[in-house]
């Protein structure tokens, strides 16, 4: 299947117009590669986080949650290899002083910005954000904002295992922010300097690594199918040996067919025992576990599954965005899976007399923890369009007849079909359609 | 009522032993004032976040959610006043070189560390973490990790209002991290360098500020009552005029009676129009809104409610922690409100033959999204104690009779009473007891 023809500009415009995502500190000219999440974006991200957590719960595996700090001391990043290995090649144009990622540029050609070919040597640019912690001169520490969530899990492996009384095979899952000072952040939410990851580190015996690697590849691909992403725009791609990161024995990416090509959505990596071994050596703390059968201590091996929530949000918007002709108009509609739609239902009043009764229905649904909106202004058609554009699966309209028949009109986003249902069927109907999204906590 | 006699050391030990909170990067000697959240801590924090969101939903006010970036450009912090005003007084001992917060120390007395009285002048120490963003020399920016969540809301006020089609009075709520390079982080989770806030900025007409200030004081105090905190250990305390921060017209704290005294749990502040005015002036963007009735543009006034989740977690642990004599033993029990307990129920098997059947009951509950544990090892008494210590409201034991009568023994944490109930009553019983906690997503 072809990549969707939706342009990035269309998505960026929708995000700002409807409050999914704004350029961070926009009124001050913005901070490149950094974004703020608006009201609908928060709801959608929360749906994504919950869908991910549910996808882990249904696997019937032992998985515990963890939230590591974002600041980490230098020693931690020495052990992980990041202070040494985490950089990108960088080159300057001597004429216009613009700086590029060397692998983005043909150095045998002219600068794409000024047209002169006059390059510096390629140098390595470090991608971690550095700061210092502590007020006392004697105890001041260099710290880095974590460039990935994984290391805090490895450094806490023994603490978590001991305090949770859990045995391998088991997983430690984490949702949280990470930071990379990208030379060239690009494609909106695709490559950001501040982003949010959802990650599982799965600890097992070395002999079981291949079986669990296969299990996780299948499970993670299934997750994207469940979110409603077309299987034809998803694929698993194994890394060639020269592509592998310094810690990895094998990596397979879940890729999505973006308008700008097949790109990584999630990385599934066999990290072996690289990390626990490194942290043991650097910290002097034994992170091995004891095998009751063989009576030997050993390092568990690790399979990692890691996806950026923001990149997944972008993927879901690309996947859901449609422009359709309706009569002589064009409607923009986000065909999000109902279970992850940021708003499950919108309540509309036909005229001023119906505002109070419509508000009552809206408040009843809101009190049940369902994500709902109410809209009293503009023509009904205009209000339908507003809800289509943010992916609301159903609109509920209170009209003249409602006063007498205690029924409302329910209108479906994708089919645009309408149906008459009684007041007391509204909430069950929303819950049936939107499933887990209706059990949300906010 | 007296402060609880529980010591901070007891809480710190419990947190590490059972996996609520660990010192961050502990295997590398730790990063002072920074903590990692273990499996039970993640569950408890998520319960706190959800309880907070529900408390907002039940107020029947218009509130939208927002998640701002953690990195902010210098211009933002110039506007907010943080680059100028956000510092603490600092003093060094010339003899031992130790550094103190000047307001923690009696400068007319000797150094509490070395016993010599030889102080430097008091200087101002800046509390924001600084870093730089961007690879290109020409576009490199000084950025700071945000010292509070509020400013990203103010800087996005117009974006949020426009894209959400919302009108004052309304609130923008945010949950997220903030960072302060405290001179002396202390009392565990009480004063951290990296922490998480839950915050509402409430925008209204100036004339309505007093009424909403009162509304929020009542609502926020009620939130803590609902969490099961003793009203006698909570109070509202209005700041004296000389205590007020540079942006505040009036502030009232919700205080908790910690073992180390009455301390702020949540701050409720009338910020006036200080922030929107500052950001308008510094950015050159008009952040006023237009009043349709008076036909004039004006800055809304702001009432802010802000609490640290980690400090609240510490409060809840202090409040819940009890040591009780049971026979000739002492049991540690966390009497957390069942709706926020990290684990709602534990399933125990009486002996090896019952493991499979117990696991089935456990899995059924887990598949419903209920936070549960299963424990097969040690005496039943020992397993009860483990669950008491982490605040699990009920234990469900499968025993010899269960095979025949399809019933289990349910044992209650606080009363230690036991009752026999049929299999199919287990989940409804947990849901009735733990309320919303059972509708959790993980």
Image (cartoon, coloured by chain):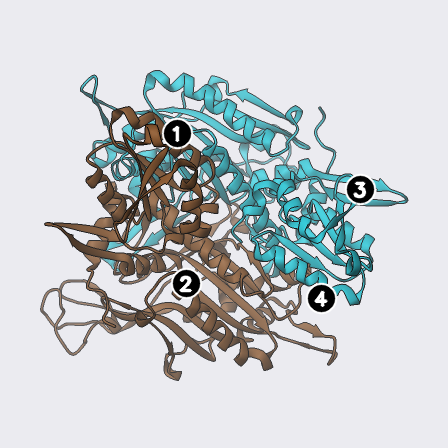
Chain colours: A cyan, B brown
In the image, which is nearer the foreground, mark 1 or mark 4?
1
Position of residue A162 relative to residue B176, above or below, is above
Tag 3: Cα neighbours inside 10 Å, few (<14), some, or many (≥20)?
A: few
In the image, which is nearer the foreground, mark 1 or mark 2?
1
Q: Where residue A109 sits in the image (x, y, percent)?
A: 63, 30
Disc 1 and disc 4 in contact, CB within 8 angstroms: no
Residue for badge 2? B226
Residue for badge 4? A356
At a point 74% along the width and 47% down the height, the residue shown is A388
Closest to the observer: B106 or A68? A68
Tag 4: Cα neighbours inside 10 Å, few (<14), some, or many (≥20)?
A: few
Disc 4 and disc 2 in contact, CB within 8 angstroms: no
Tag 1: Cα neighbours inside 10 Å, few (<14), some, or many (≥20)?
A: few
**Gap in angstroms between the C-alphas marked 4 and 2:** 30 Å
Residue for badge 1? B360
Disc 3 and disc 1 in contact, CB within 8 angstroms: no
Closest to the observer: B315 or B405? B405
Position of residue A368 relative to residue B442, above or below, is below
Give the chain of mark 3: A
């Amino acid at each position: 299947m072809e990549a969707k023809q939706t342009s990035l500009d269309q998505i960026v415009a929708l995000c700002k117009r409807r409050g999914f995502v704004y350029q961070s500190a926009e009124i001050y000219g913005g901070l490149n590669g950094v974004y703020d999440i608006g009201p609908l974006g928060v709801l959608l991200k929360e749906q994504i986080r919950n869908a991910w957590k549910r996808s882990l719960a249904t696997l019937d595996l032992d998985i515990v949650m963890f939230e590591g700090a974002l600041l980490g001391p230098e020693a931690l990043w020495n052990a992980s290899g990041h202070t040494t290995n985490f950089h990108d090649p960088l080159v300057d144009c001597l004429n216009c002083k613009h700086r590029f990622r060397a692998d983005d540029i043909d150095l045998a050609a002219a600068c794409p910005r000024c047209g002169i070919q006059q390059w510096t040597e390629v140098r390595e640019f470090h991608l971690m954000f550095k700061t210092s912690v502590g007020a006392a001169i004697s105890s001041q520490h260099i710290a880095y904002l974590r460039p990935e969530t994984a290391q805090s899990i490895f450094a806490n492996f023994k603490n978590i295992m001991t305090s949770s009384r859990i045995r391998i095979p088991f997983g430690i899952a984490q949702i949280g922010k990470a930071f990379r000072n990208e030379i060239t952040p690009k494609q909106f939410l695709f490559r950001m300097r501040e982003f949010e990851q959802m990650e599982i580190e799965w600890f097992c015996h070395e002999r079981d690594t291949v079986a669990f690697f296969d299990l996780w590849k299948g499970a993670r691909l299934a997750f994207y199918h469940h979110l409603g992403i077309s299987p034809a725009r998803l694929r698993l791609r194994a890394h060639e040996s020269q592509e592998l990161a310094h810690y990895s024995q094998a990596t397979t990416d879940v890729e999505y067919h973006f308008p700008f090509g097949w790109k990584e959505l999630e990385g599934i990596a066999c990290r072996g025992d690289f990390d626990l071994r490194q942290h043991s050596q650097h910290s002097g703390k034994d992170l091995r576990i004891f095998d009751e059968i063989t009576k030997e201590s050993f390092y568990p091996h690790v399979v990692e599954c890691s996806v950026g929530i923001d990149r997944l949000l972008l993927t879901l918007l690309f996947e859901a965005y449609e422009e359709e002709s309706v009569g002589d108009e064009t409607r923009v509609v986000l065909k999000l899976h109902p279970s992850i739609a940021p708003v499950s239902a919108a309540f509309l009043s036909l005229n001023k007399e119906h505002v109070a009764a419509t508000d009552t229905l809206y408040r009843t649904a809101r009190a049940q923890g369902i994500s709902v909106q109410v809209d009293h202004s503009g023509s009904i058609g205009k209000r339908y369009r507003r809800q289509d554009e943010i992916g609301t699966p159903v609109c509920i309209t209170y009209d003249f007849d409602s006063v007498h028949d205690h029924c409302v009109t329910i209108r479906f986003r994708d089919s645009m079909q309408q149906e008459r249902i009684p007041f007391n069927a509204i909430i069950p109907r929303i819950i049936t359609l939107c499933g887990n999204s209706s059990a949300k906590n906010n």
